[in-house]
């Protein structure tokens, strides 16, 4: 009996210890629950606790407050919660949750929209983690939800800035190419076509240069609005940059429908726009490609539409043209020629020919026009009509023009020494050479290095250059004239032929275009036109050169009308320098 007492005491002590341990565990659990409840109530982010088996869902006070419910906690079900999720996000939300429950992802993470009591939606980012048993079955899931509406709005703003043009609010090139890709995909699926219009405003640069970019921007905004009236709701209008627009016409089958839209664009583009008291008007040139007929690559389609647009400009602007295979050949040829043109100068492929300028009174050679020639190893002799415009577009005309000026002035000095008197040399110049004072600087340098007198150099300009860049070249021409350099307008009568330009610029000479001379005996109006040009020029104190003189009758008529100088095959075709020297020597021998 005495031996059992110590044993009972030990057992009683162990029981009390076990009870005390259980009481501590219970107290710890109560404190944990209290802390969890406080965390659920006071967390900055909303907390949730979900039972995947019973589908019971507990939401914290912070989450309820965000939603708009004024309770501490709420017990609901996952299916009821799903009704608060935006309809467009529900499927994605369930897919992400299902993958995590299956153990395919370590953590649950999903961004979606949740409805509040006001009927609106806000963006949330939900994190979660499933608790699993030994069989890896999820028996509980806990996590947090944070309001990311402000972040999503900021991202949306950044996305808008990255994909929309800030000036017009239209899609930019990035978004336009994405929409074009989508339209092409749908067209392949539905067996339809997509029309792609490349729209470029004609002579828009003149508005910017004359009235400033602020007025130009307002004009672009108005044109953008007008374009919207010309298309349907599912069409896309984008601004590619500058005055270039892209119009995407999905699910179009007939060329006639595309043509009708182009006609509407042309009509609305040419209507005057009133800005700051100025009535501005610009026409448009449109190039069109149609997929899949013209291809299915978005970049190639846009490039081909651009080529068709340039063809529309070439026929006189204010027009549209559909892309053809011939344009593809022209585009490839143009690209190839430009690559060859870039190496032509360094490989000494250029040369100059000289056509004599004849004094009408004496019949003697008093100067020459320098004409650029290109002997391309791949294509042979390339016409200036082909490579000069290409050189101007690419900017290569600047270094090429510098070379022409240097060579022509050097040669003129040699011929002046040979003749024992001043010898005039005429050189054609293009708009890119005027940029940043380049032409002024180059002329000064060349005259200084060669020793040619300024009044022996004549720079030939086109009427179009003066018309389209009045402000850009006006100051430069004034400075060149003050230096003593002579200025002439080439091909007069084929361009704008406006008297105000003759008065604004310090022009010395007009060159009557060869087409007028050629039609002297063909067109009844030509003699009167030539007579009028000569009389007008003389009234303004200008000299006149008759170009394209090939017949004695043409020479005689021009001489009778007091034309000052002649050029043409009747006197000499363009010759290389050595042959032209022989021509001058023959003149010297004749006295």
Image (cartoon, rainbow, N blue to C red):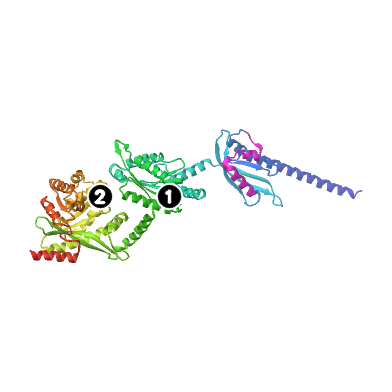
The structure residue drawn at horizontal position 52% and vertical position 49%, both measured from the top left corner, is 189
Q: Secondary structure at mark 2?
A: helix
Categorize mark 2 by other alpha carbons within 10 Å: few (<14), some (14-19), many (20+): some
* Mark 2 or mark 1, whichever is nearer to me: 1
- Horizontal and vertical percent position of residue 333: 35, 59
Q: Secondary structure at mark 1?
A: strand
Q: Nearer the viewer, residue 521 or 229?
A: 521
* Mark 1 lies on residue: 290
Image quarter for residue 126?
Answer: top right
- Horizontal and vertical percent position of residue 63: 60, 38
Camera sees residue 55: yes
Instruction: Please identify the quadrant where the C terminus is shown.
Output: bottom left
| Magenta stretch, main secondary structure class | helix
Q: Which of marks 1 and 2 precedes in the sequence?
A: 1
Tell me whether the residue at label 2 lies in contact with that at label 1, contact meaning CB atoms closer than 8 angstroms.
Answer: no
Task: Report the Cα–Cα distance between label 2 and label 1.
Answer: 35 Å
Q: Nearer the viewer, residue 235 or 146?
A: 235
The structure residue drawn at horizontal position 32% and vertical position 43%, both measured from the top left corner, is 283
Left or right: 226 as drawn, with respect to 98 = left
Q: Is residue 288 above or below residue 63?
A: below
Camera sees residue 58: no
Image quarter for residue 357?
Answer: bottom left
Left or right: 589 as drawn, with respect to 377 = left
The magenta stretch is 71-100
Q: Nearer the viewer, residue 210 or 565?
A: 565
Image quarter for residue 220?
Answer: top left
- Horizontal and vertical percent position of residue 173: 42, 48
* Mark 2 lies on residue: 465
């Amino acid at each position: 009996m005495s031996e059992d007492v110590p044993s009972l005491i030990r057992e009683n002590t162990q029981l009390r210890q076990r009870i005390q341990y259980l009481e501590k565990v219970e107290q710890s659990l109560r404190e944990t629950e209290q802390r969890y409840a406080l965390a659920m109530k006071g967390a900055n982010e909303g907390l949730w606790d979900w039972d995947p088996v019973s589908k019971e869902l507990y939401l914290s006070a912070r989450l309820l407050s965000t939603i708009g419910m004024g309770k501490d906690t709420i017990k609901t079900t996952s299916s009821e919660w799903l009704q608060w999720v935006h309809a467009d996000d529900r499927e994605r939300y369930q897919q992400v949750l299902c993958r995590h429950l299956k153990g395919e992802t370590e953590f649950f993470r999903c961004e979606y929209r949740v409805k509040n009591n006001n009927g609106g939606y806000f963006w949330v980012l939900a994190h979660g983690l499933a608790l699993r048993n030994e069989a890896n079955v999820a028996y509980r899931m806990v996590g947090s939800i944070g309001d990311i509406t402000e972040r999503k709005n900021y991202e949306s703003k950044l996305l808008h800035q990255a994909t929309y043009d800030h000036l017009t609010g239209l899609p930019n090139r990035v978004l336009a190419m994405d929409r074009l890709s989508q339209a092409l995909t749908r067209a392949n699926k539905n067996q339809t076509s997509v029309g792609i219009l490349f729209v470029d405003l004609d002579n828009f640069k003149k508005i910017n240069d004359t009235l400033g970019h602020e007025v130009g921007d307002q004009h672009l905004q108005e044109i953008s609005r007008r374009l919207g009236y010309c298309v349907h709701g599912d069409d896309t209008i984008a601004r590619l940059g500058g005055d270039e627009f892209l119009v995407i016409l999905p699910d179009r089958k007939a060329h006639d429908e595309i043509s009708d839209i182009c006609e509407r664009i042309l009509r609305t583009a040419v209507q005057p726009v009133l800005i700051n008291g100025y009535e501005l008007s610009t026409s448009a040139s449109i190039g069109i490609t149609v997929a899949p007929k013209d291809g299915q690559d978005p970049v190639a389609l846009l490039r081909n539409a651009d080529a068709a647009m340039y063809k529309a400009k070439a026929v006189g602007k204010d027009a549209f043209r559909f892309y053809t295979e011939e344009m593809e050949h022209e585009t490839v040829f143009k690209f190839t020629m430009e690559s060859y043109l870039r190496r032509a100068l360094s490989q000494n492929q250029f040369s100059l020919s000289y056509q004599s300028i004849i004094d009408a009174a004496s019949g003697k050679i008093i100067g020459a026009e320098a004409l650029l020639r290109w002997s391309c190893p791949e294509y042979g002799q390339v016409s200036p009509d082909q490579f000069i415009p290409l050189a101007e577009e690419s900017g290569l005309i600047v270094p090429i023009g510098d070379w022409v000026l240097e060579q022509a002035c050097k040669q003129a000095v040699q011929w002046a020494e040979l003749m024992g008197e001043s010898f005039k040399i005429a050189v054609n110049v293009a708009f890119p050479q005027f940029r940043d004072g380049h032409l002024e600087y180059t002329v000064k340098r060349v005259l200084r290095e060669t020793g040619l007198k300024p009044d022996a150099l004549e720079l030939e300009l086109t009427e179009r250059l003066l018309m389209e860049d009045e402000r850009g070249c006006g100051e430069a021409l004034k400075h060149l004239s003050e230096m003593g350099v002579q200025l002439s307008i080439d091909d007069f009568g084929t361009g704008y032929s406006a008297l105000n330009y003759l008065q604004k610029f310090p022009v010395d000479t007009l060159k009557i275009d060869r087409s007028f001379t050629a039609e002297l005996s063909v067109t009844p109006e030509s003699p009167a036109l030539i007579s009028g040009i000569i009389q007008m020029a003389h009234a303004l104190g200008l000299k006149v050169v008759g170009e394209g003189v090939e017949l004695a009758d043409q020479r005689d008529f021009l001489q009778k009308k007091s034309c000052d100088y002649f050029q043409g095959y009747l006197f000499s075709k363009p010759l290389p320098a050595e042959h032209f020297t022989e021509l001058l020597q023959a003149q010297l021998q004749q006295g």
